[in-house]
Image (cartoon, rainbow, N blue to C red):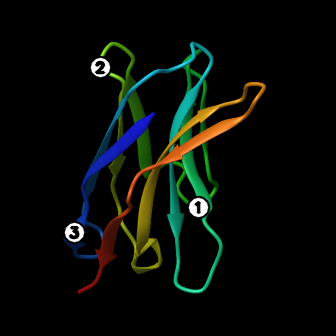
Amino acid sequence: VHVVEDGGGLVQPGGSLNLSCTASGTMRNINSMGWYREFPGKDRELVAYVTGGRNTMYANSVKGRFTITRDYAKNTVALQMTQLKIEDTAVYFCNWHEPGPPEYDSWGQGTQVTVSS
């Protein structure tokens, strides 16, 4: 599965930004799509994901501010980010996940989100 992200950029604190991601290729029916982020020198962390059954999960740090949506027909996932904070600055990665077995993950190339005044 090939994953391509779009969006990101520079925004002021309190602003909004949207990320989008498209998956293509041979996919299993049981899957999830989500977003992770990586801070300099730290491990990648989960931001949000949505399963094939439309279940969503958010990191506590983004609950109430970020919204993940998925278009199942187009195999796309979007992340609407509002009330952005300086600490949201990171490289954001789209993820395609199949629990399997065997478990399978595909990652996008990452997109920079910078929140700064």
Residue at horizontal 32%, vertical 69%?
Answer: 113
Residue at horizontal 28%, vertical 84%?
Answer: 116
Q: Position of residue 110 (x, y in %)?
A: 38, 61
Labelled disc at residue 30: none
Q: What SS does tag 2 mark?
A: loop
Distance between mark 2 and mark 1 Cα atoms: 29 Å
Residue type of the residue flagged with mark 3: Gly
Q: Residues within 10 Å of mark 3 (few under 14, many from 20)?
A: some
Q: What SS does tag 3 mark?
A: strand
What residue occupies the far right of the structure in this picture?
101
Mark nearer the N terminus (2 vs 1): 1
Q: Locate the N terminus and report the quarter of the image it occupies.
A: top left
Residue at horizontal 42%, vertical 41%?
Answer: 67
Q: Position of residue 12 (x, y in %)?
A: 23, 76
Q: Nearer the viewer, residue 86 or 96?
A: 96
Residue position for label 3: 9
Mark nearer the N terminus (3 vs 1): 3
Mark nearer the N terminus (3 vs 2): 3
CB within 8 Å, label 3 to label 1: no
Q: Locate the C terminus and report the quarter of the image it occupies.
A: bottom left
Distance between mark 3 and mark 1 Cα atoms: 20 Å
Residue type of the residue flagged with mark 1: Ser
Q: Is residue 62 left or right of residue 14?
A: right
CB within 8 Å, label 2 to label 1: no
Q: Position of residue 40 (x, y in %)?
A: 52, 84
Residue position for label 2: 74
Residue position for label 1: 61
Q: Residues within 10 Å of mark 2 (few under 14, many from 20)?
A: few
